[in-house]
Amino acid sequence: MTTPWPPRRTARRPLAPRVAAPSEPADPARIGRRVVRRRAKGMDAGAVAAALEDARFDARQNSRHEDLAGDVRGPAELAEWQRIDQMLAAAPAGAVYDPDTDDVVQAELAVEVAAAAAREAELREAVRIAARANHLQVLRDLGTLDQAEPAEGDEAVRDELTRRAGGYVQADVDAWLAYALAAHRGHFRDPAAREAAAGLLTPPVLAHAALLGELLCLVPGAGASQLAFAARLAATEPEAVSALAAFLTRARPEGP
């Protein structure tokens, strides 16, 4: 009896690439300073002075080699030995170097901690955007995108979807955002969110939303499908559409 072939599987949309954690670029100068601080820990002024002389000798030797002309670690180590030497020279007799009490070192550590926190926040935001983009993509495939409530940060999600499409404008996503902005749906109920969107969305989307807002005032309850012509106008002549929306605003009995 022959073994049957496995059943065919339907083709699946490839998943978006995983978001990689932003890596911190190597900094030879910083590495050099850290090496010096580890070596200098517990040294007194005399030991640091001797180490400084050794560093100066190495610097003179390295200056003779053209291939080391672009070296930044060596000069950084020399400068750090000089700084520590000056610090101990101004300290009470018998003092030894301790990076834990070095104000310069502690300030650098604080900056590094803040930078690491910023990178972590950037990674979390990238993961959130990717997940939201996946969700909206599924809704698009199901034809139910217009039923979704826009959420904070969807302007960045729009950019992610455009990036995934190779830079092509996602007309259905733009129309969805424009209608949500005009109808004050989802997080666009907040005036601050609508104001922020003005600096995050493209001129055609903003012009589309402005015209939709005026049309919805003329025909309350009109659906997105009934106003689809506004998207075509905004895509081709966003400046003219913005001017038309402003004109309709002035034409309203209650004024702007």
Image (cartoon, rainbow, N blue to C red):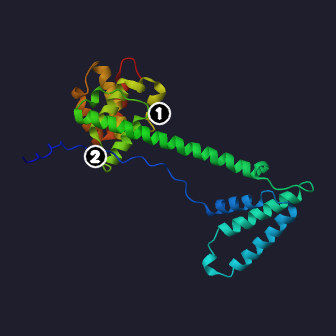
Q: Is residue 241 visible?
A: no
Q: How many marks?
A: 2
Disc 1 residue type? Answer: Ala
Outermost residue, front side: 1
User: Is the residue 107 above or below the residue 41 in the image?
Assistant: above
User: Disc 2 and disc 1: Cα gap in Å?
Assistant: 33 Å
Q: Which residue is more in the foreground, 22 or 3?
A: 3
Badge 1 marks a residue whose secondary structure is helix
> What amino acid is labelled 2 in the image?
Pro
Picture quadrant of residue 176: top left
10 Å crowding of disc 2: few (<14), some (14-19), many (20+) = few
Q: Which residue is mark 1?
A: 196
Indicate the quadrant where residue 233 lies.
top left
Q: Nearer the viewer, mark 2 or mark 1?
A: 2
Q: Which sits in the foreground, 220 or 23? A: 23
Label placed on residue 14: 2
Residue 76 appears left or right of 159: right
Q: Is residue 18 left or right of residue 170?
A: right
Above or below residue 155? Residue 217 is above
Q: Position of residue 197 (x, y in %)?
A: 43, 34
Quadrant location of the C terminus in the rendered image: top left
- Residue at (41, 39) in percent of width and height: 129
User: Which one is earlier in the sequence, the residue at label 2 or at label 1?
Assistant: 2
- Asked if residue 59 lies left or right of residue 185, the reply is right
Question: Looking at the image, which is closer to me, 214 or 15?
Answer: 15
> Disc number at residue 112?
none
Few, some or many C-alpha atoms within 10 Å of disc 1 (few <14, some 14-19, many ≥20)?
few
Q: Position of residue 39 (x, y in %)?
A: 74, 61
Residue under the image location 23 percent in, 36 percent down: 141
Query: CB atoms at circles 2 and 1 under 8 Å apart?
Result: no
- The residue located at (23%, 43%) in the rendering is 12
**With respect to residue 244, does 80 lie above or below?**
below
